[in-house]
Image (cartoon, rainbow, N blue to C red):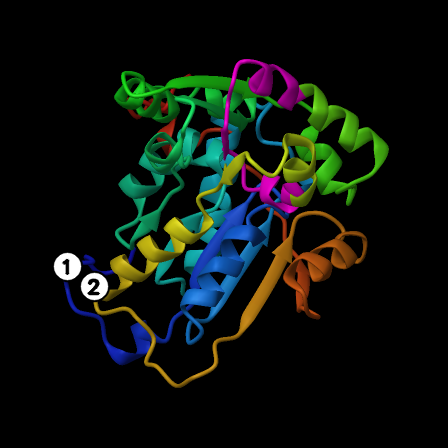
Amino acid sequence: MTQPETLLASESQALAPIGVFDSGVGGLTVLREIRRLLPAEDLFYVADSAHVPYGDKPSTVIAARALAITEFLVERGAKAIVVACNTATGAAVRLLRMRYSIPVIALEPAIKPAVERTRSGVIGVLATRRTLASQNLMQLVERFASRAEILLQPCPGLVERIESGDLDRAETRALTQDYLEPLLARGADTLVLGCTHYPLIRPLLQRLAGPEVLILDSGAAVARQVQRRLAETGLLAPPGRRGRERFWTSAAPAQLYPLMAHIWGAPLDLDHWETQDDPNPWWMSAEGARE
């Protein structure tokens, strides 16, 4: 395990990479925001696309995947971990913070800014079923329920369409329309994207919802939180250097490469990674690890 984060880091620790992971390619939307804000940082990204989507899996399975990926990134020197997946945040972030002393930054759907910016007083949250059922999300909704009507819309199948590279074809358009219609019919003028895959279809969402509907995601806020946490612990990379990226996927790299390169906007170094989940993980007996 790393040294306690209250200790100021050495120069070599500051040059270590930031580890980021998601169930698939969606976390690249968060990675882009981190790169935009922190150009000097080295970034390691794992797309667990062989196991996508997380949203229809038991929380114990999601936690096992999150722990395996985090261990892989920590073994490669990660100085911080970004859980770029709302579903994995709900299932595993407490376990990760129990096990690792480095900063672990998680997602929070943009409900607070949505409540602050809605004009109609109605906001819609698009997310996986697992995210919508999570304690984190429920607590967030309860905190702001007195200030706006918050509508929760599960979106089964949408992650799979996006992961397949279908960002604007007929099937994705029809599925998206089905999920938007009940929210718009009840007066939602602000939409919260509660899955990191969904910003990849933001143009489609905006076109279907109309130009007057505000669409929010958490990517930029997460990047700012990464910057704050690294600054607090002396882990920010020195300015003036050009950060590099490395990418891994549990799927077939040749199959996933075109989509990832398209999303990233440049050629990338993509390798294969996989691990066998421990059938008797240490955390199964930990309080709060059960469903």
Assess whether residue 255 is covered by the magenta stretch.
no
Taking 30 as reference, is 10 left or right? left
Q: Residue at x 30, y 26 (%)?
A: 286
Find the distance from the CA under tag 2 to the CA under tag 1. Answer: 6 Å
Which amino acid lies under the numbered mark 1 shown in the image of this protein? Thr
Q: Residue at x 44, y 44 (%)?
A: 218
Q: Residue at x 54, y 42 (%)?
A: 196
Instruction: Determine which quarter of the picture holds residue 3.
Output: bottom left
Residue beneath disc 1: 6
Q: Residue at x 55, y 52 (%)?
A: 29
Taking 80 as reference, is 187 left or right? right
Instruction: Determine which quarter of the picture holds residue 136.
Output: top left
Compared with 177, 220 (above or below) is below
* Image quarter in which the N terminus is found: bottom left
| Residue 91 visible in this rendered orientation of the protein | yes
SS of the residue under disc 1: loop
Which amino acid lies under the numbered mark 2 shown in the image of this protein? Thr
Front-most of 88 and 184? 184
SS of the residue under disc 2: loop
Compared with 81, 147 (above or below) is above
* Sequence-wise first label, 2 or 1: 1
Residue 22 image offset from top left, x and y in percent: 54, 45
Q: Which residues are magenta?
A: 179-202
User: For mark 2, does the 10 Å Cα neighbourhood hold few (<14), some (14 to 19), or many (20 or more) residues?
Assistant: some
Residue beneath disc 2: 233
Residue 257 image offset from top left, x and y in percent: 75, 58
Compared with 29, 209 (above or below) is above
Q: Are marks 2 and 1 in contact (CB under 8 Å)?
A: yes
